[in-house]
Amino acid sequence: MLVVYMLLDGVTRAIPIILLLYATLNVFLYRSCTWLLWTLLVSEGFNLILKEVVFRAVLGKHKRLPLFGVGERPPGAHDCGPFSTYGMPSGHAQAVAVFSTFMILVAWNMRQPLLQKIVASSFFVLCAATVMYSRVAWAGCHTYGQVVLGALIGCLVGTGSYTVR
């Protein structure tokens, strides 16, 4: 069981890097994926601004945001990335939600059979849900509220990016 936990923990921590590499490689294979790469990079910067400028200033140390809870990382959170950042919103949840939302919209706007669209969408939702759950349950780096807010922001960014492209 420990081996499975360690494997899943490692994979879910690497998902944002894997997504960026996937998008980067697709730049050379499909020019249309350049937009997704830039969206992911801009979203990452936007997340850092939200964490360090907006939510840290609004919530500080012990304030709570209705529905989403506290902004600080949970007690005992460690090894949550190379840099120590504020917890609200989850950057992993935001990145995977941007990617998954964008790819689901791509899938649903292609001329493919309905079953293929459902399978592709289910795959992206499952990947996103696994990463989001791992940030709370396995890594212990976020609260559920931080992950939900990151996912909502990511869905908005992914939808907006797909619409604008």
Image (cartoon, grey):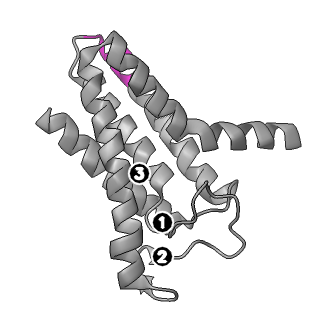
Q: Would residue 48 be found to the left or right of residue 2 on screen?
A: left
Q: Would residue 150 be found to the left or right of residue 36 on screen?
A: right
Q: Amino acid at mark 2?
A: Gly
Q: Residues within 10 Å of mark 1 (few under 14, many from 20)?
A: many
Label 2, label 1: how far apart the Cα atoms are: 7 Å
> In the image, is residue 27 part of the stretch drawn in magenta?
no
- The quarter of the picture where the N terminus appears is top right
Pick whichever, 73 or 52, lies toward us: 52
Label 2, label 3: how far apart the Cα atoms are: 15 Å
Element marked by disc 1: helix
Single out the residue that lies furthest toward the front: 83
- The quarter of the picture where the C terminus appears is top left
Q: Is residue 4 above or below residue 90?
A: above
Q: Which mark is residue 71?
A: 2
What residue would you read off at disc 1? 146
Pick whichever, 2 or 72, lies toward us: 72
Q: Amino acid at mark 3?
A: Gln
Element marked by disc 2: loop
Mark 2 or mark 1: whose residue is earlier in sequence: 2
Q: Position of residue 32 (x, y in %)?
A: 24, 20
Residue at horizontal 45 percent and vertical 33 percent from the top: 20
Q: Position of residue 40 (x, y in %)?
A: 35, 40
Looking at the rendering, the stretch of residues picked out in magenta corresponds to: 112-119
Q: Are marks 2 and 1 in contact (CB under 8 Å)?
A: yes
Q: Position of residue 3 (x, y in %)?
A: 85, 38
Q: Residues within 10 Å of mark 2 (few under 14, many from 20)?
A: many
What residue would you read off at disc 3? 94
Q: Position of residue 147 (x, y in %)?
A: 48, 59
Q: Amino acid at mark 1?
A: Gln
